[in-house]
Image (tube, grey):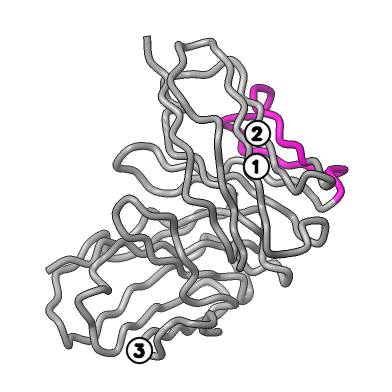
Amino acid sequence: EVQLVESGGGSVQPGGSLRLSCEVSGFIFTTYWMHWVRQAPGKGLEWVSRVGSDESSTKYADSVTGRFTVSRDNARNTLYLEMRRLRVEDTAVYYCARDHLGGYGMDAWGQGATVAVSS
Amino acid sequence: DIQMTQSPSSLSASVGDRVTITCRAGETINNYLTWYQQQPGKAPRVLIYAASKLQSGVPSRFSGSGSGTDFTLTISSLQPEDFAMYYCQQSYTGWTFGQGTKVEV
């Protein structure tokens, strides 16, 4: 069974940092690109970041470029999102998601990790 | 970024109704269009990928059509568990979601 389990969410003040983790199982992690997608309270889905299968290629949404860093540890089957200089508007549920092998969207999702940024 | 525009933003329907949601891309995305369903407090799940291919395990009352810039998600006979949010997403250039459509009673 394919599983993605996020952890590391929490509350932080503006300007602070957090690191999210996403441990996966049930599939060959090294085969897949992986994404982070977020959803602010009461809002829609926003793509945040993508990492290639070997971490050599990363992409970010303009809203997080320069503040967030995506990485992966293929030996540990784990995806990470390092978030720095957090803003109130980064408050959201953060989902990790697996890229469809054919490039058609994201075919498996974690349950989400909540990040709350407030003073 | 390719903009994705869904319509309507919300709709009211009853069990058994045929429901249609549309999604328009700001430029051509070929068939790189995915439809998701999201229940409150849950992660999204894939319904349709490649514009018209039914994801494994998804009931056949869901169908998708379109290519280029205009796409449609149809629920042929709405069931109680189908009241939810629906999102389209393009993955032709980057990844962009539509703003969502709420299907409610």
**Could you tell me if the residues under marks 2 and 1 are in contact, i.e. CB atoms within 8 Å?**
yes
Please identify the quarter of the rendering in which residue A17 is found: top right
Residue holding disc 3: B61
Tag 3: amino acid: Arg
Q: Secondary structure at mark 3?
A: loop
Q: Are marks 3 and 1 on the same chain?
A: no
| Mark 3 burial class by Cα count in 10 Å: few <14, some 14-19, many 20+ | few
Tag 2: amino acid: Leu
Q: Specify the subunit that label 2 lies on.
A: A
Residue beneath the point at 61% across and 38% down: A61
Instruction: Please provide percent x and percent y for residue A55.
Output: 83, 43
Residue beneath the point at 68% across and 36% down: A80
Residue A71 among magenta residues: yes
Q: Secondary structure at mark 1?
A: strand
Residue beneath the point at 61% across and 68% down: A1
Instruction: Give left or right: position of A5 versus B61.
Output: right
Instruction: Give left or right: position of A40 versus B1.
Output: left
Q: Secondary structure at mark 2?
A: strand
Residues in magenta, as a range: A54-72
